[in-house]
């Protein structure tokens, strides 16, 4: 049942019961680093298979393709005892189980970690991902990225004052929660190496969202002043903002006095650092509007791309505001080998690089239940037993035999 032998996690076996984003992202990274990942979907399939257009030639949404490469796929109705027996056979030699059901679901099926799985599989690392955790005022409730952005203050510090609070354009809370889960799993595996025992770990969107409030939470604790909308500007640093030049916009990030002096020298404002309004970061924050106006007036006739390149060469961080296609096509994206191509599939590789045990992005994302026969055969189910599982609805047939309605 092994996909490949490369990567730091070669030989590790992962049962992936997750759908949508945070969980599948976590397990895709595990797969990229060599783990064998079996994706177990409910009979209706992972919701992201339907979140399109765009769809690929097999009818799967591009959204699904972003998060599920390198995995094998089977679909089980885990509310049935037959499907649970399949899961137990998977867990017999699994290292990790990851799930993102509503809290209490696994317990309702008789698959709770403390009550059942920890006793039956004492080396298992069990990761649960949820919106709010199992208890507390919001315990057990469903959570989605944008809802948590709103609830946890993230949205309140994103956007222009004139337009109001705005959702961040990427699902940053889901994404980071996937990395929180990944980190917790790897730490639990390290602990297991020392103790011989697995454990349950947890990642919630709520905790992750609150952890993103840097430096806004700390600013509030220290000042008692509620953070406000600043557009692209930074609450603690200036100039650290978006500016308009000829042919486009760029972001300039100045973190220290040396960078500020070099910026001013390059754009023809060598006296600006000696102006008492701008002589310190505190002063620049107090006069951020005047500072931005002065910088934009100085660069209004400068070509945006050339200005970014020149500023970077003198040690001032600056970057043009690229579109998604422009960012993916950038020469440095190619140099860093960030794009993955597997036949018709294209994706973005996991961002970590392991020089001693390099991983390798796996095969294209699987079609619905495409590996059911292979997985069941590898678990010891013969052809008669497999057909009985299909007929009972405990295991869904591969996509060619069982079609998911695209709604």
Image (cartoon, rainbow, N blue to C red):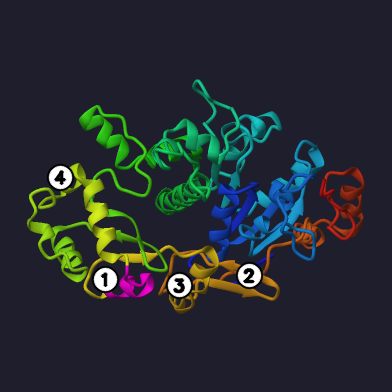
Name the mark nearer the viewer: 2 or 1.
1
Q: Answer whether labels 1 and 4 touch (C-beta < 8 Å).
A: no
Earlier-in-chain disc, 1 versus 4: 4
Mark 2 closeness class: few <14, some 14–19, many ≥20 residues within 10 Å: some
Q: Which residues are magenta?
A: 301-312
Image-quadrant location for residue 73: bottom right
Residue 8, position in %: x, y? Answer: 48, 67
Q: Answer whether labels 2 and 3 touch (C-beta < 8 Å).
A: no
- Residue receiving disc 4: 282
Q: Main secondary structure of the magenta part?
A: helix
Mark 1 closeness class: few <14, some 14–19, many ≥20 residues within 10 Å: some
Name the mark nearer the viewer: 4 or 3.
4
Describe residue 148's horizontal placement relative to residue 301 as left or right. right
Q: Residue 288: which numbered mark, if any?
A: none
Earlier-in-chain disc, 2 versus 3: 2
The secondary structure type at the circle numbered 3 is loop
- Residue receiving disc 1: 311
- Residue receiving disc 3: 357
- Residue receiving disc 2: 346
Earlier-in-chain disc, 2 versus 4: 4
Q: Nearer the viewer, residue 292 or 7?
A: 292
Q: Can see residue 365?
A: yes
For the residues labelled 2 and 3, the Cα–Cα distance comes to 24 Å
Is 112 within the magenta?
A: no
For residue 212, above or below residue 331: above
């Amino acid at each position: 049942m092994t996909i490949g032998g490369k990567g730091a996690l070669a030989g590790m076996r992962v049962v992936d019961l997750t759908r949508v984003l945070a969980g599948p992202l976590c397990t895709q990274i595990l797969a990229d680093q060599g783990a064998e990942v079996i994706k177990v979907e409910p009979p209706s399939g992972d919701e992201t298979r339907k979140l399109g257009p765009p769809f690929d030639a097999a009818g799967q949404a591009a959204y699904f393709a972003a998060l599920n490469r390198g995995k094998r796929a089977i679909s089980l109705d885990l509310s049935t005892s037959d499907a649970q027996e399949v899961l137990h056979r998977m867990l017999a030699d699994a290292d990790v189980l990851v799930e993102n059901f509503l809290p209490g679901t696994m317990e309702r099926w008789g698959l709770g970690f403390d009550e059942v799985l920890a006793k039956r599989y004492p080396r298992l690392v069990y990761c649960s991902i949820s919106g709010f955790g199992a208890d507390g005022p919001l315990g057990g409730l469903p959570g989605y990225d944008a809802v948590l952005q709103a609830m946890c203050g993230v949205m309140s510090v994103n956007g222009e004052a004139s337009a109001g609070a705005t959702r961040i354009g990427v699902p940053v809370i889901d994404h980071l929660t996937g990395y929180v889960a990944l980190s917790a799993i790897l730490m639990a595996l390290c602990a297991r190496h020392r103790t011989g025992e697995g454990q349950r770990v947890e990642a919630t969107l709520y905790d992750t969202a609150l952890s993103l409030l840097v430096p806004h939470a700390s600013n509030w604790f220290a000042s008692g002043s509620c953070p406000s909308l600043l557009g692209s500007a930074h609450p603690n640093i200036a100039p650290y903002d978006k500016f308009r030049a000829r042919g486009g916009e760029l972001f300039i990030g100045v973190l220290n006095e040396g960078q500020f002096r070099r910026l001013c020298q390059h754009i023809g404002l060598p006296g600006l650092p000696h102006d008492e309004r701008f002589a310190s970061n505190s002063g620049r924050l107090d006069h951020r509007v005047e500072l931005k106006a002065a910088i934009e007036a100085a660069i209004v006739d400068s070509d945006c791309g050339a200005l970014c390149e020149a500023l970077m060469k003198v040690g001032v961080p600056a970057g043009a505001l690229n579109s998604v296609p422009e960012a993916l096509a950038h020469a440095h994206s190619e140099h860093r080998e960030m794009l993955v191509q597997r036949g018709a599939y294209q994706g973005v590789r996991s961002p970590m690089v392991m020089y001693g045990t390099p991983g390798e992005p796996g095969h294209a994302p699987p079609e619905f239940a495409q590996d059911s026969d292979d997985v069941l055969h590898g678990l010891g189910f013969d052809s008669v037993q497999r057909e009985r599982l299909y007929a009972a609805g405990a295991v869904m047939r591969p996509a060619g035999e069982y079609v998911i309605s695209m709604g």
